[in-house]
Amino acid sequence: MKHGKKYEEALKLVDRQTYYEAAEAISLAKKTATAKFDETVELHIKTGCDGRHAEQQIRGAVVLPNGTGKTVKVLVFAKGPKLDEAQAAGADYVGGEELIPKIQNDGWLDFDVVVATPDMMGVVGRLGKVLGPKGLMPNPKAGTVTMDVTKAINDIKAGKIEYRLDKSNIIHVPVGKASFTEEALLENFNALMDAVVKAKPSALKGQYIKSMTMTTTMGPGVRMNVAKY
C-alpha cells in the first residue's frame, strides 16, 4: 500500500523499534497528525482474550474526562413521561415504535448512539439486524438500556465511549482529537485504561493486554509499552 508524502514524513518521527510510554506516544501522535481536518487520536488494544467464550467477552463504557471532541447524536427509544424526560435532557431524536420502519425500510441512521428504556427493548430488538452490525444496539453493560435516560444522555454528550472486543479480540477506541492538549489526551487515556484494566475477565489465563498502538486517523501507528498493564 502506497502512502502519501505527509504520511512518509510523519513515519520518520516514529521509531518502529521503540515501545513508547503514554505521554511520549501522545506527543508523537499529535506531531504526526498532519491532515487538513482535526484527526481523531485512537487507541488499539490487542488482548489475550478469546471472545468466542462468553466469560472472556469485554464490553463496557467510560466517560472521558475531556470528552471526545465529537458532537454525538443520541436517539432515545422511550414512551410516556420518559419521552419528555429524554427531550428535556437534550436527546437529538426521541420516539417509539413509529421509528422502526424509518430505520428498517428507509435506512435512516443519522445518529451515533441509541438509548432505550427497558420496556422498549422488545421494540428495539426488531432492529437487531440493522443496529447490531453497526454496534448501535442498546446494551445494559454500556449503560444504554436504562430508566435513567437523563444520566445516559448527559454521560454520552459529556464524552462517554463504549469499548468492546472486535472479532480479532482487539479493542478500538477514540482518546480525543489531535487538537486537544497533551494533558487532556493523557487524562482521557488514563481514564480509559483504568476502565479496561478493571474489565479484565476473571476467566482469562495468561497475558491480558498483549500490545497497544496509538494512531491518528491518517497517521502512522505508535507502539506502546504495556509492561505496567
Image (cartoon, rainbow, N blue to C red):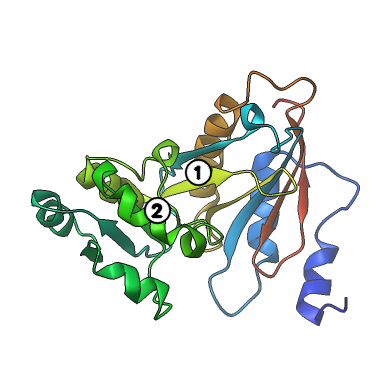
Q: Residue 73: name its quadrant.
A: bottom left
Q: Is residue 186 left or right of residue 9?
A: left
Q: Is residue 225 visible?
A: yes
Compared with 187, 229 (above or below) is: above
Q: Please determine whether, in this image, residue 37 is positioned above or below residue 134.
A: below
Identify which residue, 151 or 182, lies in the foreground.
151
Mark 2 or mark 1, whichever is nearer to me? 2
Task: Tell me what residue is drawn at x 22 percent, y 40 percent.
Answer: 148
Name the residue tied to disc 1. Answer: 188
Circle 2 — which element? helix
How crowded pointer 1 is (Cα within 10 Å; few <14, some 14-19, many 20+) is rated as many
* Rendering quarter of residue 96: bottom left
The residue depicted at 55 percent of the width and 77 percent of the height is 37
Amino acid type at mark 1: Asn
Q: Nearer the viewer, residue 116 or 36?
A: 116
Q: Which mark is residue 63?
A: none
Distance from the alpha carbon under mark 2 to that under mark 1: 33 Å
Q: Earlier in the sequence, mark 2 or mark 1?
A: 2
Query: What percent of the width, then of the height, locates residue 4?
Result: 80, 81
| Mark 2 surroundings within 10 Å by alpha-carbon count, few (fewer than 14), some (14 through 19), many (20 or more) | some
Who's the residue at 66% across and 49% down the image?
166
Residue 43 coordinates in the image, percent (x, y): 64, 50
Q: Which mark is residue 125?
A: 2
Which of 3 and 144 lies nearest the eye of the viewer? 144
Q: Position of residue 25 (x, y in %)?
A: 70, 48
The answer to whether 142 appears left or right of 93 in the picture is: right
Q: Amino acid at mark 2?
A: Gly
Q: Which element is circle 1 on? A: helix
Q: Is residue 39 above or below residue 65?
A: below
